[in-house]
Amino acid sequence: MKMMIAMPILVLTVGCLILPVSSHGSALDHGIYRDLLTLYVRDGVVDYRGLKQEESRLDEYLRLLENTDITQLDRDETYALYVNAYNA
């Protein structure tokens, strides 16, 4: 039996992933995280065992966030970065 726990904050996170490109053209690519959430979240419930198998992809995404120059992001992009970093 898969261990699944509800995570309402992930709904907020998924919403943050769908951001338009800012006027200065720099949008942070949340594709890795979006793909993982698509695979392992259903109706607000997270399959943590499945997600744990993708730890290297989560680490890759966190490195991307870590190496992002937040001074080049607009307010919405910065918010998405911090929310996603917290949840990932």
Image (cartoon, grey):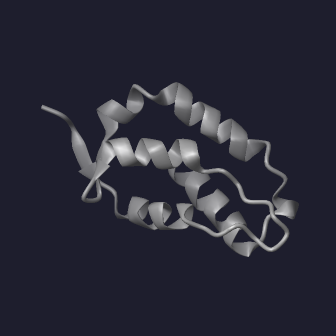
Total marks placed: 0
Relative image position of residue 31 (x, y in whole percent):
56, 47
Q: Quadrant of residue 10?
A: bottom left
Asked whether 57 or 26 is in front, the reply is 26
Query: Farthest residue in the left direction?
Result: 1
Relative image position of residue 87 (x, y in whole percent):
51, 52
Q: Quadrant of residue 76?
A: bottom right
Q: Residue at x 66, y 50 (%)?
A: 29
Asked whether 79 or 28 is in front, the reply is 28
42 lies left or right of 39 = left
Q: Is residue 64 above or below residue 6?
A: above
Q: Is residue 38 above or below residue 48?
A: below
Q: Residue at x 74, y 43 (%)?
A: 66
Relative image position of residue 37 (x, y in whole percent):
41, 48
Q: Is residue 24 above or below residue 26?
A: below
Q: Quadrant of the N terminus?
A: top left
Q: Residue at x 60, y 68 (%)?
A: 19
Q: Residue at x 75, y 70 (%)?
A: 22
Relative image position of residue 61 (x, y in whole percent):
62, 39
